[in-house]
Image: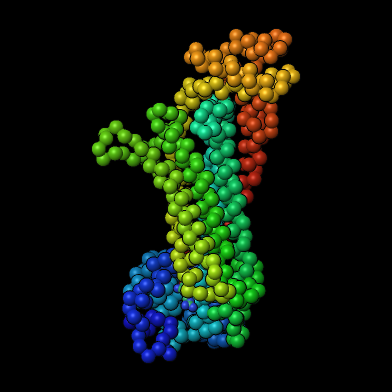
């Protein structure tokens, strides 16, 4: 197809467009990803045109047939090849051109009352809905996996030393760490749910270029066809609004921040020095030089991809600042940043889910080091406070005992408890946890690492995750 017929404008131009500038302005490679959504939007537009008697029933049927065929071509990949060869400026122009080619005589009616401005906004809303459902389901899958692992390791009472600043801090159960991972991804899932709900609220379709249409488009009808609650209220706002798409990208970036943080931990856990976790061969990579290497590359890539997606999000938001109301071509850049960031981000989230499922826990390695670093010191100080010693005096006395034990290269013992009791004026017997498991069992607050508290957390989150977001309008 020649450029002349694939472009949707040109009547008032005396010369053809500069080829390099036209290529610079093309968004086809970026927006091909929502071809399926534009097909949905186009079919709803045909229904709206027909409901308003703008086109005949025969035209509506012909256009719909063509769009169904284009939808099939999108699935097989044939449409992408056709669109690239067509010289169209973007996916919207390409679909319009393909429909005109398939249905000459009827195809020319498709764009009645429509602008690419309301098309882009509609496709973005449908895309946001679909990808939010996907992000939600991946996040829920990760959370569920973490909860299941938490349940199986809970009974084994696998202890490890939780760190702050990567320094040994306090004993926890592995189940507690796993439940924490589940909480992070449950929050990610909730963010995706909010995006999903917002992306179903208002239909941009029928807003036109910026002020609505003089044709009797049935916007209620097209909104309903696409599963929106209602047509948007203000066309001027609608064509320049990228909020839902940005919120989607934000939700992806935030889910990846969670994945990145867990990945950081697992990269370290998979080192021989730590040995807390093992990644299956299927998820590991080797070195081209060092024959012994097994590297946890997926977690390293996920760790960094959060930065890439957050950067794309920052760029997308920045690209909308200072844009006057209505549509301006700058928004094509916004869309590009959103689509590329979101696609890569969701791929990274999938990769994390897969690598996480390939991760196994080495309880012995954790238990072996669970008591390193005097991690029961806080429990001993707490026991003093419970006996009436002030927090400051307790902290100082236990700190001094830790210094003595460290100088002698030994753990804290019963004789240290006796010395601490004497230093703080506590009548013997003075009891306090001296090992990691005793510490965990002594914890008594809601949300603590005590096994009973962990079970409450697992049960609560599992019940919350029982619901599913399903999207009958999902495509692509
Ligand atoms: N390719 C454009 C985009 O992605 C389509 C909208 C063009 N609208 C216009 N008025 N030139 O934003």
What is the x, y in percent for residue 256?
50, 49
The mark tally for this picture is 0
Residue at x 61%, y 85% (from the top left corner): 216
Classify 227 as above or below 185. Answer: below
What is the x, y in percent for residue 217?
60, 82
The residue nearer to you, when weighing 286 against 470, is: 286
Classify 142 as above or below 244. Answer: above
Identify the image quadrant of residue 86. Answer: bottom left
* Left or right of 299, for residue 325: right
Q: How is the image coloured?
A: rainbow
Residue at x 40%, y 27% (from the top left corner): 273
Residue at x 60%, y 67% (from the top left corner): 227
Residue at x 52%, y 62% (from the top left corner): 317
What is the x, y in percent for residue 251?
55, 54
Q: What quarter of the picture does the N terminus occupy?
A: bottom left
Quick check: can you spot residue 231? no
Quick check: can you spot residue 440? yes
The residue nearer to you, when weighing 399 against 58, is: 399
Classify 440 as above or below 87. Answer: above
What is the x, y in percent for residue 224?
62, 71
């Amino acid at each position: 197809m020649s450029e002349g017929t694939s472009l949707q404008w040109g009547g008032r131009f005396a010369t053809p467009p500069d080829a390099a500038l036209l290529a610079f302005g093309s968004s086809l490679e970026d927006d091909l990803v929502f071809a399926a959504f534009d097909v949905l939007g186009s079919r709803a537009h045909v229904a709206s045109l027909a409901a308003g008697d703008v086109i005949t029933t025969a035209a509506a049927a012909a256009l719909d047939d063509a769009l169904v065929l284009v939808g099939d071509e999108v699935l097989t990949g044939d449409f992408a090849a056709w669109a690239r060869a067509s010289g169209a400026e973007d996916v919207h122009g390409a679909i319009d051109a393909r429909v005109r080619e398939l249905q000459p005589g009827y195809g020319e009616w498709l764009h009645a009352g429509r602008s690419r401005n309301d098309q882009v906004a509609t496709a973005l809303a449908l895309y946001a809905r679909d990808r939010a459902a996907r992000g939600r389901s991946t996040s829920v899958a990760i959370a569920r996996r973490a909860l299941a692992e938490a349940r199986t390791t809970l009974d084994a009472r696998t202890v490890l030393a939780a760190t702050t600043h990567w320094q040994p801090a306090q004993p926890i159960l592995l189940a507690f760490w796993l439940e924490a991972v589940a909480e992070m991804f449950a929050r990610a899932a909730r963010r995706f749910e909010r995006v999903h709900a917002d992306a179903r609220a208002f239909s941009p379709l029928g807003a036109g270029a910026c002020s609505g249409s003089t044709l009797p488009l049935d916007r209620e009808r097209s909104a309903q066809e696409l599963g929106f609650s209602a047509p948007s209220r203000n066309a001027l706002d609608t064509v320049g609004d990228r909020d839902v798409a940005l919120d989607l990208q934000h939700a992806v970036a935030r889910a990846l921040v969670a994945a990145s943080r867990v990945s950081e931990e697992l990269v370290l856990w998979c080192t021989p020095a730590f040995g807390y976790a093992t990644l299956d061969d299927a998820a590991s990579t080797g070195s081209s030089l060092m024959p012994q290497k097994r590297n946890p590359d997926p977690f390293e890539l996920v760790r960094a991809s959060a930065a890439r997606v957050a950067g794309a999000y920052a760029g997308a938001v920045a690209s909308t600042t200072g844009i006057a109301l209505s549509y301006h071509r700058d928004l094509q850049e916004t869309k590009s940043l959103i689509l590329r960031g979101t696609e890569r981000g969701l791929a990274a989230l999938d990769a994390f889910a897969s690598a996480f499922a390939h991760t196994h826990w080495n309880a012995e390695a954790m238990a072996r080091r669970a008591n390193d670093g005097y991690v029961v010191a806080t429990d001993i100080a707490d026991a003093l406070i419970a006996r009436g010693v002030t927090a400051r005096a307790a902290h100082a006395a236990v700190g001094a005992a830790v210094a003595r034990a460290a100088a002698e290269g030994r753990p804290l013992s019963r004789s240290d408890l006796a010395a601490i009791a004497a230093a703080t004026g506590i009548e013997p017997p003075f009891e306090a946890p001296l090992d990691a498991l005793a510490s965990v069992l002594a914890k008594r607050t809601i949300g603590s690492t005590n096994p009973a508290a962990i079970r409450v957390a697992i049960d609560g989150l599992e019940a919350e995750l029982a619901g599913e977001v399903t999207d009958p309008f999902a495509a692509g």
